[in-house]
Image: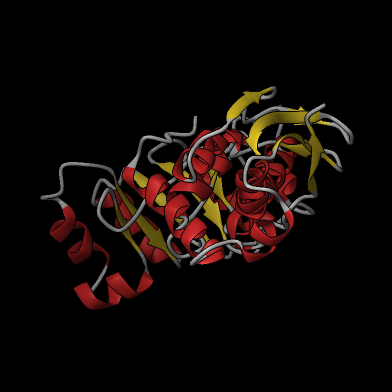
Amino acid sequence: MFDVEHADVREAVERALAEDIGGGDITSQLTAPEDLNAHGSFIAKQSLVLAGVELLPLVYAVRGGASLQILQPSGTKLEKGAAIASVAGRARTLLECERVALNFMQRLSGVATLARKHVDEVAGTKVKVLDTRKTTPGLRRLEKMAAAAGGVTNHRFGLFDAVLIKNNHITAAGGVRQALEKAHAFQGPVEIEVRTRAELEEALACGAERLLLDNLTPAQAAEWVRYINGRASTELSGNINLSNIREYAHAGPDFISCGAITHSARAVDISFRLELNQ
C-alpha cells in the first residue's frame, strides 16, 4: 500500500528530517548521553484510520537505524489507546526522529480517516469515491497512498498520466468536439467535463467514454445520469461533502471525486512515549 522504495517517498522523508534536524538536535545532544539506549511506543490518541506507519523504518534508517516493530498496518481502523508501533535504539536517534515520524503519520492518517468516512457514506451503492490533485505540494504520492489506505480509489496522479478535458481546455480547443478530436491521439483514459445539456449531447455524439458532471445539484445529477443511461461512465464533483455525498451517490454515478479528502483533512492525534531501558 505504501511504496517506501519510491524515490518520491525517500526524498520526502530525507527532506523532512533535514528540515527539522538541520545541523543537529541541540536539545537531545545536551540532555541525552551519547551512549544512552531507550525504547518507545507510538499510541493512537483518538479513533483513526492508520496510514504511513510503513515510513518509520525509512525515517530511522536515514538517522542511523533503530529496532522497529510495526504492530498495525496502514488501512487499519484503530480506537483510542491502540499501540501502533514500538522502536528501540539510541535515545538521541529516537528523540531526533520523533517529530518527523509523528508529522507523517498524523497527517497521512488524517487523510486516510477522512477518506474512510467518505467511503462509508456511500456504502451499499455502486459508487467509487475518488481523490483529486488537490494535495500538499511535494507530498502527492504519500497523500494518495493515504487516501487509498482509507479505501478511496486514486484518480489520475498528475497531468501526465490521463486526459481530463475541463472547461478551460474546451475553451482553448474551440469546443467539445474539437477538444475530443485533439485528445484522440492519447493512448489512455480520456475524460471530459460537460457544463450544459448541449455539451453533454455533443460529447456523447462524439463517443466520449467518461464524463465529468461538475457542480450539479443531486436532482440535476440524477436527471443527467438517467439521460446518459450507461452510454458513458459518469463522475460527479463540486460542492460534495460528507453531509451530501450519499444523496449524490443515489443519483447513480459511477464515481464521485472529493478534493476535501486531501485538501481539508485534519491531522489526527498520535503520541510517542519514550522510556529508558532497565
- Along the viewing direction, whichever of 47 and 32 lies nearer the viewer: 32
Q: Is residue 50 left or right of residue 209?
A: right
- Answer above or below: position of 208 versus 260: above
- Along the viewing direction, whichever of 21 and 24 lies nearer the viewer: 24
- Answer above or below: position of 256 versus 38: below
User: Which image quarter: residue 237?
Assistant: bottom right
The answer to whether residue 185 is visible is: yes
Q: Quadrant of the C terminus?
A: top right
Furthest residue to the left? 185
The answer to whether residue 253 is visible is: no
The spot of residue 63 in percent (x, y) is 49, 45
The spot of residue 212 in percent (x, y) is 44, 54
- Along the viewing direction, whichever of 129 and 75 lies nearer the viewer: 75
- Along the viewing direction, whichever of 208 and 198 lies nearer the viewer: 208
Q: Is residue 92 left or right of residue 57?
A: right
- Answer above or below: position of 65 versus 135: above
For the rendered model, the colour scheme is secondary structure
- Answer above or below: position of 86 versus 167: above
The spot of residue 100 in percent (x, y) is 60, 53
Q: Is residue 95 left or right of residue 58?
A: right
The image shows a total of numbered marks equal to 0
Q: Residue at x 28, y 43 (%)?
A: 189
The spot of residue 258 in percent (x, y) is 59, 54
Q: Residue at x 15, y 42 (%)?
A: 187
Q: Residue at x 47, y 56 (%)?
A: 139
Q: Residue at x 48, y 34 (%)?
A: 2
